[in-house]
Every structure is written in structure tokens, then in C-alpha cells.
Image (tube, helix red, strand yellow):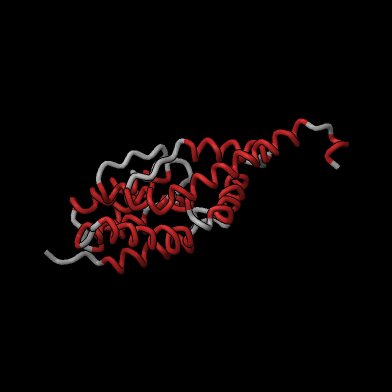
Amino acid sequence: MTEPDFEGARTYALMRLAQELPETVTYHSVHHTRDDVVPTVERLALAEGVNGEDLLLLRTAAYFHDLGFVVRREEHEQAGAEIAAKVLPQFGYTPAQIDKICRMIMATRIPQSPKTLTEQILADADLDTLGSEHFWRQSEKLRAENEAFDGPMSDVQWYMTQVTFIENHRYWTATARALREPRKQQHLAQLRKMLEHALRQAEMPVDEQS
């Protein structure tokens, strides 16, 4: 069986992300895919012993996991899986391989429910930032993106959203838990303090805040 044209598929996904995403998509950008998720996928795969065809399919899924954003924001995982199913045959991927890739893409949907190790790795890589040193910068980008689509949020609303999300999140692979869980918990503790402060500020009379 001939090897799929991974480089062709990769180039296709990156080109569409770079050219078709609106400027308002500041978090789920080409940088998120290329500079955050893909390197994390490769690091986790190495640590978890994933190689060969499984690694090739996992890397392909990583490049396509947010491509659905070029079509729509809601249910973008489904849109991305549909794009992958449509275009990957051109790059020599078999139906069975494409099915695995689509399942990996769908495993990033919130709430996450990955079944296989490769699905778990992509799910963990997609939310790696929660426990990374880049969390606060990425958080600002996500807030800007959400406000561009949904309108302004108060600090109370934003911190509450973040606290709830992180409280309900889990890393699936042992590697991600070891690497990211401690710092994620630090971020959660800081966010709780920020939420408490924002709530106190919101309750103050306006003249006391100046």
C-alpha cells in the first residue's frame, strides 16, 4: 500500500487556515494549529509510544482539527471532519484511515470523550495551553475571539467561564497529566482569586472604584 501524501495534506490545511480564517479568529488560528497543537501532539506521541501509521494519521488529524472554522464556528469539529473526509482521498488516504482521522477530530469536541490513545493525545494537545506557560496570553486571545463573535463580556463573566471550564477539564494521557496538571491547578487557583476580586469590584458603588 502506498503511503499517503502527508505533506500535501498538511500544506492544504495550513493554506486554508492562513487564507480563509477571519481576522476575528485570534485563538483558533493557524498559529494554534501549527505552533501549539502539532508540536504537542508529536511530543505526547513520542512519550506515549505512538509511531508508524498511527502517528501519521494523528499528525494529519492535528492539522485538520480546527479547519472547520473556515466554514463555521458552531460545530466546527464536524465541519472539519467533513472537510477531511472530502479532501483526504485526493492525498491517498484510505477510507479506514480517514475514518480514524475524523474520529480524532471529533474527540476534540467539548465535552471531550476520546476513546483511543491517538484520540486522547489530540484531545490533550488541543487544550495543552491550560497547563502551559502560555496560558495567560492564550486566554487573552480566546477572550478577544469570543467577544468578537458574542459581544463584550465582563471580567466576572469571563473568569467564571474560565473557572468552570478548567474545573470540568481533565487530561487523558499520563504524559499530559504529569506535564500539565500541576500548572493547570495553579492557573485555576489564580483565576478563582481574580474572580473573587472582580465580584467585589462589581459590588462596589461606582465612586468607590475610582
> At 34% from the left edge and 48% from the top edge, which residue is drawn?
105
Give x and y (percent) for residue 155. 67, 40
Question: The N terminus is located in which quarter?
Answer: bottom left
Pick the residue in front: 184 or 4: 184
Q: Is residue 31 above or below residue 147?
A: below
Quick check: 23 left or right of 69?
A: right
> At 66% from the left edge and 40% from the top edge, which residue is drawn?
153
> At 58% from the left edge and 45% from the top edge, which residue is drawn?
146
Q: Quadrant of residue 158?
A: top right
Number of labels in the image equals 0
Pick the residue in front: 78 or 52: 52
Q: Quadrant of residue 51?
A: bottom left
Give x and y (percent) for residue 139. 57, 50
Pick the residue in front: 204 or 76: 204
Quick check: 124 left or right of 51?
A: right
> At 38% from the left edge and 59% from the top edge, which residue is drawn?
40
- For this orientation, the residue located farthest to the right is 207
Question: The C terminus is located in which quarter?
Answer: top right
Give x and y (percent) for residue 208. 86, 37
Give x and y (percent) for residue 125. 39, 53
